[in-house]
Image (cartoon, rainbow, N blue to C red):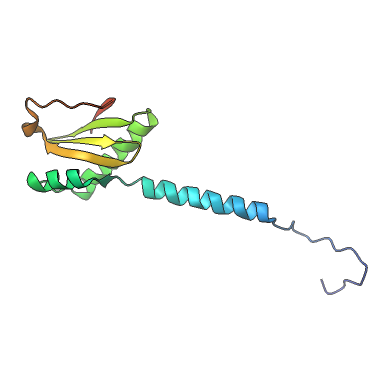
């Protein structure tokens, strides 16, 4: 750039980035951040109370299986799903990525699970 004279046209070696390209990068980053945050399942107040009442604590491995199950259900188009994991059962809002309720399977006797469109065995 040191040899440019007045009224001489300068042609850069690399194309200039436009504001439009920068906004595209920002929105794709925002989308990626949103997707990452949504990939972790959360628990409703009701589900937290149920876990506490039944003395259920989930390991990292169990949480990962639950997250993977939600991702699988989402791929299949599920909105509300019953997820069974060994002796535990979860009703999950797939579209909100939230556990609605949790229970031990032995306490499910004579219980009816409604408003679900799928079931997964994890």
Tell which residue pokes out farthest to the bottom in this image: 2
Snapshot quadrant of residue 18: bottom right
- Front-most of residues 8 and 26: 26
Asked if one can make out residue 104 in the rendered structure from this viewpoint, the answer is yes
Residue lying at 83% horizontally and 74% vertically, measured from the top left: 2
- Front-most of residues 2 and 72: 72
Q: Considering only vertical position in the picture, is 111 above or below 54?
A: above
Where residue 33 sits: x, y (%)? 44, 52
Where residue 35 sits: x, y (%)? 42, 46
Where residue 20 sits: x, y (%)? 66, 52
Asked if residue 87 lies left or right of residue 83, the reply is: left
Residue lying at 83% horizontally and 60% vertically, measured from the top left: 11
User: How many callouts does the rendering have?
Assistant: 0
Asked if residue 117 lies left or right of residue 104, the reply is: right
Asked if residue 47 lies left or right of residue 26, the reply is: left
Q: Which quadrant would the C terminus be assigned to in this image?
A: top left
Residue lying at 19% horizontally and 39% vertically, measured from the top left: 101
């Amino acid at each position: 750039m040191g040899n440019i004279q007045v009224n001489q046209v300068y042609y850069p070696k690399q194309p200039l980035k436009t504001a439009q390209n920068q906004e595209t990068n920002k929105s794709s980053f925002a989308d990626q951040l949103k997707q990452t945050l949504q990939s972790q399942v959360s628990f409703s107040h009701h589900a937290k109370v149920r876990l506490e009442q039944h003395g259920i604590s989930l390991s990292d491995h169990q949480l990962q299986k639950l997250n993977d199950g939600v991702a699988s259900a989402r791929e299949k188009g599920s909105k509300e799903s019953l997820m069974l994991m060994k002796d535990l059962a979860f009703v999950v809002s797939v579209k909100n990525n939230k556990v609605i309720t949790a229970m031990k399977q032995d306490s499910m006797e004579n219980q009816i699970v409604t408003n679900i469109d799928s079931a997964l065995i994890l």
